[in-house]
């Protein structure tokens, strides 16, 4: 069995060789980037966890034992198949999410990266992120992931309060979280993100802001703030229903979010997306692809992707969803080379709706140039320029529409969902007007 370090060296060597070849082919000039239709991000889903967190309704499984070699073979096979189907020539980032991918062996991570580097161009400096849960002894394991090719960590810290961590059913303590964060920063300086949750039952604004301030003493250059969402079918939902735990308070959660954005702004963080904050330019390029509606391939049980299957002669972008349950997914991969359960072709209006809803999550919003890549005929001005309701949002200072494009203001970003209730119907109306006027006699 090859060691993770050897595997990663395999990936890095493959990436360097491709880079040299491209330079030679480009007669010394730096290589021209592939068109957007030949570029993609790659998401890899590791579906297993050690224990079910009380609030979690993600696609995860708590297995008695994991057949890791079989799982690895299937991840590799599906990555090969989807790369071939997509006709993608350059993978710009890889994200190992879950579940708990830090429970996978570094050897598995290395095998997937090596496959990607062999099948396509994976630049040596591509962002390769792994989601990791805090543990009591993080050091050597994180180092092994680094040797396997991971260069960015996203740590599910969630809280710095042991009582809250117990309520959430997490397996770690606050001191485990800080120990893991310190080890991660030593290994991946400038490339460590932490998740912090807000809006937990009984959580108060002051103490939560205190946690955030405390976190600022320990964190690196990226923080994600997530509001707890109470989901049916979770243990926490039942506890709240039975009155054992108070229901999360939405107004307090909104206050925490506002206070948190302010604290982070003062600490030099840019809120570049609704939930994400970075300083020193440490934005996640992988997630940026999602918000910009770039192509991405989703490998693993329940993974989602969005790409044009050009390698199979397709011309339309598709939403693809892989089979959820790991054993069924593995059977399908072994039979067909992939476990795609659903393929939904996306029309131009659906694409524009996504561009709008995803783009407005970011601080730059949607530029005119970006919008035109998806529809050169219908401009942002055509859609929103003459609408009375949109004008009202502009006047209330929630939205901006100018020479740069359309974006939320600082005040508008927290109420994006309510803005979309006005913007999406306006887009649909403009689309219908255009399509009916282009029908002869329409
Ligand atoms: S570790 Fe993450 S994916 Fe797993 S149960 Fe907890 S919240 Fe869900």
Image (spheres, grey):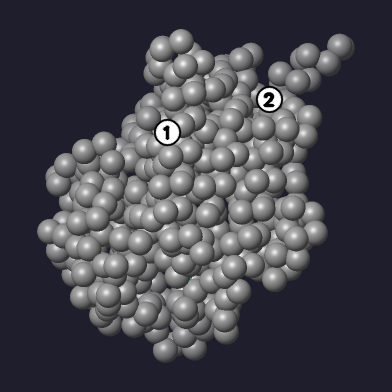
Q: As displayed, is residue 38 above or below residue 288? A: above
Which quarter shows the C terminus?
Answer: top right
> In the displayed structure, does residue 13 sit left or right of residue 193?
right
> In the displayed structure, does residue 432 sit left or right of residue 355?
right
- Judging by the rendered image, the residue that carries numbered circle 2 is 431
Depth check: give the residue in front, 6 or 82.
Answer: 6
Q: What residue sits 50% from the left and 48% below the top?
A: 113
Q: What residue sits 60% from the left and 23% below the top?
A: 374
| SS at circle 2 | helix
> In the displayed structure, does residue 316 sit left or right of residue 248?
right
- Judging by the rendered image, the residue that carries numbered circle 1 is 16
Q: What residue sits 66% from the left and 52% below the top?
A: 78
- Of all residues, the one furthest to the right in this rendering is 441
Depth check: give the residue in front, 76 or 131.
Answer: 76
For the residues bearing labels 1 and 2, Cβ distance under 8 angstroms: no
- Sequence order check, earlier mark of 1 and 2: 1
Depth check: give the residue in front, 282 or 214.
Answer: 282
Residue 412, given in percent of the width and then of the height, sits at 37, 39
Residue 25, given in percent of the width and then of the height, sits at 51, 15
Q: Where residue 289 is drawn, which disc sits there? A: none
Please name which of the two marks, 1 or 2, marks the residue nearer to the observer. Answer: 1
| SS at circle 1 | helix
Q: What residue sits 37% from the left and 37% below the top?
A: 125
Quarter location, residue 162: bottom left
- Cα–Cα gap, marks 1 and 2: 46 Å
Dot 1 beta carbon under 8 Å from ligand 1: no
Quarter location, residue 334: bottom right
Q: Residues within 10 Å of mark 2 (few under 14, many from 20)?
A: some
Q: Is residue 254 visible?
A: no
């Amino acid at each position: 069995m090859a060691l993770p370090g050897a595997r990663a060296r395999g990936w890095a060597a493959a990436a360097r060789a491709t880079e040299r070849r491209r330079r030679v082919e480009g007669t010394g000039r730096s290589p021209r980037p592939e068109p957007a239709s030949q570029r993609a991000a790659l998401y890899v889903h590791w579906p297993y966890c050690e224990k079910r967190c009380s609030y979690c309704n993600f696609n995860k499984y708590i297995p008695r034992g994991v057949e890791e070699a079989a799982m690895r073979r299937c991840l590799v096979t599906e990555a090969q198949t989807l790369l071939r189907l997509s006709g993608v020539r350059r993978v710009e980032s890889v994200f190992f999410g879950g579940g708990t991918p830090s429970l996978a062996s570094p050897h598995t991570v290395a095998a997937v990266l090596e496959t990607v580097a062999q099948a396509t161009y994976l630049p040596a400096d591509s962002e390769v992120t792994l989601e990791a849960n805090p543990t009591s002894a993080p050091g050597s394991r994180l180092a092994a992931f680094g040797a396997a090719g991971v260069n960015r960590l996203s740590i599910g810290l969630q809280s710095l309060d042991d009582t809250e961590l117990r309520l959430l059913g997490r397996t770690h303590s606050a001191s485990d979280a800080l120990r893991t964060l310190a080890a991660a920063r030593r290994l991946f300086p400038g490339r460590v993100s932490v998740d912090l949750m807000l809006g937990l039952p009984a959580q108060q604004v002051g103490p939560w802001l205190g946690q955030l301030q405390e976190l600022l003493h320990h964190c690196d250059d990226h923080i994600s703030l997530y509001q707890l969402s109470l989901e049916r079918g979770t243990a926490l939902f039942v506890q709240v229903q039975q009155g054992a735990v108070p229901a999360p308070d939405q107004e307090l959660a909104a206050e925490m979010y506002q206070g948190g954005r302010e604290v982070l702004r003062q600490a030099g963080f840019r809120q570049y997306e609704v939930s994400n904050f970075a300083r020193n330019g440490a934005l996640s390029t992988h997630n940026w692809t999602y918000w910009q509606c770039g192509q991405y391939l989703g490998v693993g049980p329940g993974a989602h992707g969005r790409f044009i299957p050009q390698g199979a002669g397709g011309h339309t972008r598709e939403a693809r969803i892989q089979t959820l349950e790991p054993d069924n997914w593995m059977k399908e991969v072994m039979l067909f080379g992939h476990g795609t359960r659903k393929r939904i072709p996306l029309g131009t209006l659906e694409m524009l709706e996504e561009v709008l809803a995803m783009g407005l999550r970011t601080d730059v919003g949607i530029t005119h140039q970006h919008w035109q890549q998806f529809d050169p005929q219908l401009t942002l001005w055509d859609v929103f320029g003459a609408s009375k309701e949109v004008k009202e949002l502009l006047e209330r200072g929630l939205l901006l529409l100018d020479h740069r494009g359309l974006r939320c203001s600082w005040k508008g970003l927290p109420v994006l969902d309510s803005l979309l209730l006005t913007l999406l119907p306006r887009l649909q109306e403009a689309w219908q007007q255009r399509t009916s006027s282009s029908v002869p006699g329409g």
